[in-house]
Image: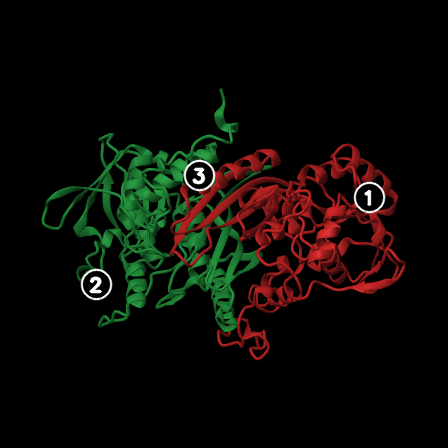
Chain colours: A green, B red
Amino acid sequence: MNDDNDPNLNCPVPISDYPRILLAHGGGGKLMHQLIDRIFATAFKNPYLETRHDGAVLETGSDKIVLTTDSYVVHPLFFPGGDIGSLAVNGTVNDLAMCGARPLYLSAGFIIEEGFPMEDLWRVARSMQQAADSAGVSIVTGDTKVVDKGRGHGVFINTAGVGILEHNQVVNPGQVRAGDAVIINGDIGRHGIAIMAQREGLDFETEIESDCAPLSDSVQELIKAEIEIHCLRDLTRGGLATSLVEIAESSGRQIWLDEKTIPVRDDIRGACEILGFEACYVANEGRFTAFVAEKDAAKAVEILRTRCDWPEATVIGRVTEEMAAEVIMKSVIGAERVLDMLSGEQLPRIC
Amino acid sequence: MNDDNDPNLNCPVPISDYPRILLAHGGGGKLMHQLIDRIFATAFKNPYLETRHDGAVLETGSDKIVLTTDSYVVHPLFFPGGDIGSLAVNGTVNDLAMCGARPLYLSAGFIIEEGFPMEDLWRVARSMQQAADSAGVSIVTGDTKVVDKGRGHGVFINTAGVGILEHNQVVNPGQVRAGDAVIINGDIGRHGIAIMAQREGLDFETEIESDCAPLSDSVQELIKAEIEIHCLRDLTRGGLATSLVEIAESSGRQIWLDEKTIPVRDDIRGACEILGFEACYVANEGRFTAFVAEKDAAKAVEILRTRCDWPEATVIGRVTEEMAAEVIMKSVIGAERVLDMLSGEQLPRIC
């Protein structure tokens, strides 16, 4: 019997556990994964969703394209190093890049709260265009909705992105192999701390700017150099730790990290200590990990450092021989511990 | 000098006119068109946006695909004949169909208000899947954000859609020709009245259900029969009148309508009289006009009536020889008047 067509099928998140949506359901951690698995992946069951990737690889006639989407609800709308507009372009461009695609086109849907200043909307739209120019994409179609005052929050932006796959490398968590090097392109934690500092009116000695940046050129350089890439993942909600746990769980592989090799700026480390955060759970908007065949690791790091302007790119870990879906981090003092996904929300409304 | 790169360029909507966004900026009428022209089309200037169509026709490698997007903020979320989920699928499927494309894939972005009932989210997701099944599309990628209580309104949904152009007909307002027949697929005004009745607790003798439905099969049938289609437009925000004024303005052509041929149900006519609306400005979610070469008009109507289950499909007007960007309607008592776009908002949060 196929109960897919039974409209009375019970809600698969037990109501007694979570009768209502919590902020944590959007925080990038365990509850969000549970919500996506039990509600959306169950209702929309299809093979595209099962890859658990940043976007879907699709056949249209003779081409392979990638489709991805993200809504942006960051608050505050303007922050050091970016704004909701640059985030809405770079975030979606980066999701396409993480699927190995060359980003081409974006759509933009605006949900604007009644009373939102026209000047701010113009500022956001200009920022989107500048980010689109930098990333080499065009914003080709859009939609505008206005909701009653008190039923939105300034402006929410959704972008969907279309990119094209121009190579035969399959890049997704299922391709991760024992021995793969885990490479990061730079220091972590800046976006989350920049938002938090702005939101809470915290003053650090140096202004902390978001790392918001497009990653598509970097990925294209790696592909052009024929680096054997197995998986790519940007380190947004939930940070480095959560994204690696996702990959460990999807691939069934054990990932081993060396904490002392993970670049963290001193001011970020200090801010994390004050705020009680761990840098590896803080959101980034211009950082990614590449899982690369061992033989190509040194070359990949070299390309990121010299051709892509990521001087701190480095190997931070390895995929082990163990078939254990977990991430183990050797701390700076040498102790080993299993990393978990972010549970609940650390910083809501971060993207 | 290219001032496209000047970040200080002044906001092109004069601030003294509209310093803040009004609900009417999302109502589908004049103010929304002004906002889109002056803010978004100015900031994102590119040839794709200039076609002023429901979606963008794009080249990816060797294929022609269409990308479109819409956000759905309808309130109430559940209404007779549909809900925000079925609307979010059909609305975007229909935008693809109006570009002459065969809809293939959708993305879905959810912005959920903290505290939203889990059961309602499940109900919406199931409704989306049922609508996707009916329209023959797959929901292949998605995103979930949660906003603080009082900063959203239950759930907002964005869908973006990708379709493929499998024929060489160019379908857009620029193709409209003198002599073209304007064909409608059924009676108008149901969706707007259904929402309004639900929102205001109005009780009519018969329950008025939204006309929410996918239109892609109907368009595919017309294309398969080699009907010479010049333009297609769904009759959503702003209704029949606003959508025809848009086409008249984009094409520079005069459109002549005969009011007595436009199908309106008696209960809708009655509700419009009570509420002070004109049916031709009320939103629909399963109605479209096709601008078809004169020679194919009778055949197109026949196909819609017999093969597509639209028994009321009919010719409601013609494109005249006049190069005047206007819509003229001959009323039931024989008087002629120029139709204007909806000015301001008639019914906000309708889709």
Name the foreground residue: A232 vs B267: B267
Q: Residue B152, how many percent across, how many down?
A: 44, 56
Closer to the eye: label 1 or 2: 1
Badge 2 density bin: few <14, some 14–19, many ≥20, Cα 10 Å? many
Which subunit holds the residue at mark 1? B
Badge 3 density bin: few <14, some 14–19, many ≥20, Cα 10 Å? many
- The reply to whether dot 3 and dot 2 touch (C-beta < 8 Å) is no
Mark 3 and mark 2 on one chain: yes
The image quarter containing residue A195 is: bottom left
Q: Is residue A229 shown to the viewer in this render?
A: no
Q: SS for tag 2?
A: helix
| Quadrant location of the N terminus of chain B in the rendered image | bottom right
Locate residue B338 relative to residue B145 in the image: left or right: right
Q: Which residue is mark 2?
A: A271
The image quarter containing residue A77 is: bottom left
From mark 1 to mark 2, how far is it between C-alphas?
Answer: 68 Å
Locate residue B48 relative to residue B20 in the image: left or right: right
Q: Which residue is at a point 27% across and 57% down the rendered structure image?
A: A189
Q: SS for tag 1?
A: strand
Q: Which residue is mark 1?
A: B314
Q: Residue A211, how many percent across, how many down?
A: 34, 61
Q: Which residue is mark 3?
A: A40
From mark 1 to mark 3, how far is it between C-alphas?
Answer: 40 Å
Mark 1 and mark 3 on one chain: no
Three-letter residue code for mark 1: Thr
Name the foreground residue: B245 vs B52: B245
Three-letter residue code for mark 2: Ala
